[in-house]
Image (cartoon, rainbow, N blue to C red):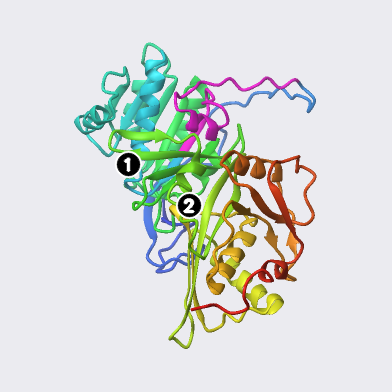
Amino acid sequence: MAKTTTAYVCQECGSSTAQWAGKCPGCEAWNTLIEEVTGERGPGKPSSDGKVVALQTLNAEIPDAPRISSGLAELDRVVGGGLVPGSAILVGGDPGIGKSTLLLQAAAELANAGHTAVYFSGEEATAQVRLRAERLGVASAPVGLGAETGLAHILKTLGESEKTPDLVIIDSIQTLWSESLESAPGTVSQVRACAQSLVRYAKRSGATLVLVGHVTKDGQIAGPKVVEHMVDTVLYFEGDGAHQYRILRAVKNRFGPSDEIGVFEMRGDGLREVANPSELFLGERDNVSPGAAVFAGMEGTRPVLVEIQALVAPSPLGTPRRAVVGWDSSRLAMVLAVLHTRCGLQLGTYDVYLNVAGGLKITDPAADLAAAAALISSFSGVALPVGNIYFGEVSLSGAIRPVGHMAARLKEAEKLGFTAAAVPAKLGSDAEETGLRLEPIAHLSELTANFPPTGDM
């Protein structure tokens, strides 16, 4: 016979314990254990007999996954070429970043193309969604709209529709609740159970499911981590409120590359796709000021040129400041140590500020050389040559290591009118013929030799 049990579940990591404690034994977070009542099947036989699973060989023919265009080329690019029927996508992002706007535009484009799209909002009334649709200019799109948070009602509506929807959007998964659980909406148990039921529906029906997820103060999707394992694709919608651009980044994708990005520009009438993000990030560049270097980076399969800005100023403090925006502070500390030890730049008494223009966040290690060039330029007070780009990984010995996708980086820079490139001395095997003048650098000291030893500050 089924019985109910009481457990205390951490709302941060999802670990469960039989007794309440002030600190979670799993993640050691304080005051995160919430009492939840769940049902368990008693000992005995399973509810139904199992079935024999047909096994296949590894060399069986693999058909290509069918795709449905969302109508937004940047979204299709990030998910791998289009929406895959029966797949589940989780989209996370900061409040107000534009997640609902993006998905409503995608649903409208898909519906206008003859497909069926259903949008369930658990945070807004239908009137509010209609107002947003009017602002975006998509109010006439035949999108099914509903305001519901009950999981059973949503599944009943989807199951009894005349035609299986091609796209189902749930905004958001944290607002849903299941009658089988006594815990409140948004708790770990509710999020896990609702996500599991919706993913099961998507796999069974062939509809593409998109779940919107809230994020924590650390930028991670709230709720149990198992939800990210359930879905096929996890996307993060990133951006800075002070800038108009937004980046849709794939961190997990079973049907395409997991590090692809799509770039959008937020405007009054919605999101506009940016086909060439390099022009967006370099549009207001100052070519004559010291401390600015253009970095040719890679975001997934897309080359992106962005300006790295540095400011080195004498510090009145005993411990100089090190401030970084858009880059890893640990890598800045490493580059400063290499400049000090291997190149003789005495930066220990200077404040150092580093910024990636446009608010873009860079994780590519090839940005080391561009950051070092910007720091050297600011320290010496001499601007870098106009028309140069920089990329290469700096090792602890000061050597410049080769990086991947050199041909794509050089091709993008040449397309935007750059004339020269400071690159690692050992060119990669993928470096093709280019019209740029290559300036190979084997050691970081070769870069500092072109500047005065001290700053004119």
Which residue position holds label 1? 175
Which residue position holds label 2? 360
User: What residue sits 56% from the left and 55% below the top?
Assistant: 386
Residue 295's x, y, as percent? 58, 53
Question: Helix, strand, or loop for circle 1?
Answer: helix
**In the displayed structure image, the side of residue 406 where residue 280 appears, left or right:** left
Q: What residue type is disc 1 on?
A: Thr
Question: Helix, strand, or loop for circle 2?
Answer: loop
Please tell me how crowded label 1 is: few (under 14), some (14-19), or many (20+) other residues with Cα within 10 Å: many
Question: Does residue 117 appear in this view?
Answer: yes
In depth, the one of 110 and 422 nearer the eye is 422
Residue 408's x, y, as percent? 66, 41
- Count of all numbered marks drawn on residues in the image: 2
The segment highlighted magenta reads 61-90
User: What residue sits 45% from the left and 28% below the top?
Assistant: 72
Q: Which mark is residue 434?
A: none
Q: What residue type is disc 2 on?
A: Leu
In depth, the one of 387 and 58 nearer the eye is 387
Residue 22's x, y, as percent? 40, 69
Residue 335's x, y, as percent? 63, 69
In the rendered structure, which disc, 1 or 2, sits on the residue that comes first in sequence?
1
Q: CA distance from mark 1 to mark 2?
A: 31 Å
